[in-house]
Image (cartoon, rainbow, N blue to C red):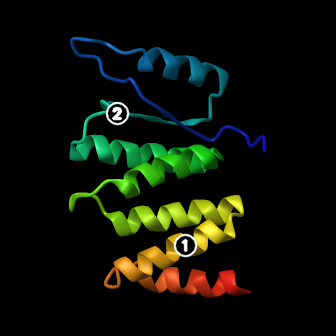
Amino acid sequence: MNAPLRALAVTGMHRGENPQPGAAVVASVRRRFPGVRVIGLSYDPLESSLYGQMALMGKADAQAQGGQLDAAIETWKGLAAKSGEALPVDAILMELARAYVQKGNREEARKTFTELVDKHPQSPYTGEARAELENLKG
């Protein structure tokens, strides 16, 4: 699928002691694709801080919006696998399931919606996940 470039997540935006090349990449992309939505992320991908994890959530969202579903799915899966109360795992599972639906992978979508309903019954996403499960049956 060759979708037009609408959104792009760029890492390496750190400009501190060890500057990274993200700003140059953004400038180059904006020259080539003037209407693209660029999300600049400044984080250490190995860092497990809340800010690093939130940056990864933004990256996954931009990947999905940009049609990079395989990359988005891998990012969401990595986030869902992390334990800890700081991350909204129910929201992550919902986004992962939506990406599976968008990709056409009904079985993985069904498994992920079911996991959300079973493990997070009080989540505000549970009702929507149940409705999606019904849609996937038909």
Compared with 20, 107 (above or below) is below
CA neighbours of label 1 inside 10 A, class few (<14), some (14 to 19), many (20+): few
Where is residue 105 shown, x and y percent of the image? 68, 64
Which comes before the other along the chain, label 2 or label 1?
2
Helix, strand or loop status at disc 1: helix
Q: Is residue 128 above or below residue 107?
A: below
Q: Is residue 43 left or right of residue 62?
A: left
Name of the residue lying farthest toward the right: 1
Q: Label 2 sits on what residue type?
A: Pro
Q: Answer with the quarter of the image where residue 126 lies.
A: bottom left
Which residue lies under the disc numbered 1?
111
| Dot label at residue 45 | 2
Seen in the picture, residue 105 relative to 68 is either above or below; the reply is: below
Mark nearer the viewer, 2 or 1: 1
Residue at the spot x=23%, y=47% of the render?
A: 50
Q: Which mark is residue 22?
A: none
Q: Quadrant of the C terminus?
A: bottom right
The type of residue carrying mark 1 is Lys
Residue at the image position 78 percent from the left and 45 percent from the top: 1
Residue 56 drawn at (x, y percent): 39, 44
Please name the residue shown 37% across and 69% down the image: 90
Secondary structure of residue under mark 2: loop
